Image (spheres, rainbow, N blue to C red):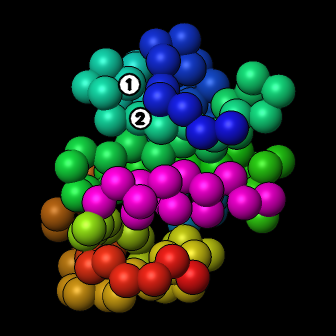
Amino acid sequence: MIRQGRPLDAGAMGAILHGFETGTPWMPKQHSGAEAVGFCGQLVDKGWVTVATVDRKVTAFLARDGAEICALYVAEDARGQGHGRALLQDAMGRCERLWLQCFQDNAQARRFYERHGFAAAGFGDGTGNAEGLPDVLYEWNGGNWA
């Protein structure tokens, strides 16, 4: 099920986000679990969040500010099951154009976005993000959903 994020979702979202940070070898370890929950709460409060749920459990979330996808994360045990795809498809159905930045080292995410019609539009050296990691600007300008 896809639905709008709610304040009580911040804990589950924070666990997903923090799990990605701590479980990804190339990702700098910069935030505590509590900081991740607080950050996710801010995203929900702004009205930017859509979540995927199974049996009322949040399995993935997407935060979007207009055409910018600010975050898309899937719980480790839910990856490869279509949760991220469903959230992205929902966002694509609401916007004619989307863009996002993805870390260059995140090969799995890069393949995911490219498979769904996003094209690399630029490369950064990491000076534009808090993690200091080289990134890729991806854009999607409508078209058929693959």
Crowd tier of the residue under label 2, counting other residues whose Cα lies within 10 Å: few below 14, some 14–19, many 20 or above: many
Magenta stretch in the rendered image? 81-95
Q: Pointer 2: what residue? A: 49
Tell me where residue 129 appears, x and y as whole percent: 24, 58
Q: Callout 1, which amino acid? A: Val
Was residue 24 drawn as part of the magenta stretch in this picture? no
**Residue at image location 23% in from the left, 58% down from the top:** 67
Q: Pointer 1: what residue? A: 44
Q: Secondary structure at mark 2?
A: strand
| Above/below status of 82 relative to 70 | below
* Residue 119 - label: none
**Residue at image location 45% in from the left, 83% down from the top:** 144
Snapshot quadrant of residue 8: top right
Earlier in the chain: of badge 1 and badge 2, it is: 1
- Magenta stretch: dominant SS? helix
| Above/below status of 58 relative to 88 | above
Q: Quadrant of the N terminus?
A: top right
Tell me where residue 132 appears, x and y as whole percent: 29, 62
Residue 138 or residue 31, whichever sits in front: 138
Q: Callout 2, which amino acid? A: Val
- Asked whether the beta carbons under mark 1 and mark 2 sit within 8 Å of each other, the answer is yes
